[in-house]
Image (cartoon, helix red, strand yellow):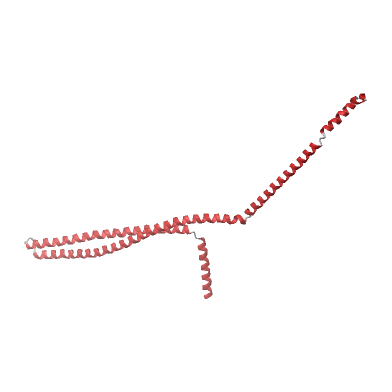
Amino acid sequence: MNIFKRLFKIGEAETNSAIDKMEDPIKMTEQGIRDMKIDLEKSLEALAQVKALAIRSKNDQDVYKNKAKEYQDKAIIILKKANNKEMDAVEADRLAKEALVQKENNEKQLEATKKETDKFEVNVSQMQGNVEALKANIGNWENELKTLKARVKVSNATKNLNKQMAELDSTGTVSMLERMKEKIAQEEALAEAYGDIANSSKSIDEELDKVADTTEAAADDELQKLKEQLGFNKSKK
């Protein structure tokens, strides 16, 4: 039995871990704020209903108070009429007594209504406090959400930048650039070497041409051959 419990606990822990990885704190916070706003709407509606009951209870107090006074006044009027022989004394006593009973009933209703009003006012006060606390919590959560979103943007940007910087050397980009620099430097040196060789060869040819110019000698040979063909050399002999 203990083995099954341990297996269940392990599975539960793994499930919770997977859920934690899947949960987005921003979405969770947004959903929490939406839920709290729904609760706030319900609380405001309930508060309005309780306030309405308190207002009605206060109005009932005025009604019962006025009725009690009316029955008191009626009893007085009836007794005065009996005293002035304007109506039968027995009937006057019966009616005056009935008026006093109604007065007492309204006074009892007045006291009961006062207690109800006190209870309603306590409920209103408590609910008002809860509503204000809920509003404050929603405001705090909304501020937390703004901060959380800003932190997520910064952390994502930092993470992406750090990832790019980390992958820069791992992908061989830096080493590749170094090899390119080395190759370019080698090619530049080789080009310079060829240039020196070309300049050196050109200088030697110029020196040789200057010292042993064959152009004039070749012209002399051609001139001599032409004279021979024309027979000029023979006539001179």
Can residue 1 be seen by looking at this rendering?
no
> How far across and down, in percent of the image, does residue 158 sit?
52, 55
| Residue at image point 73% right, 44% down | 196
Q: Nearer the viewer, residue 111 or 210?
A: 210
Compared across the picture, whether 50 is left or right of 16 comes to left
| Residue closer to the observer: 5 or 81 | 5
Relative to 26, is 166 on the left or the right? right
What percent of the width, then of the height, locates residue 108?
21, 65
Residue 222, can we see it? yes
Which one is in front, 4 or 17?
17
In the image, taking residue 139 as reference, residue 167 lies left or right, namely right
Q: Residue at x 42, y 56 (%)?
A: 143
Of 209 and 11, which appears nearest the observer?
209
Total marks placed: 0
What is the residue that sits farthest to the bottom in this orientation?
A: 1
Residue 212 position, x and y percent, is 82, 37
Q: Residue furthest top?
A: 235
Q: Quadrant of residue 68?
A: bottom left
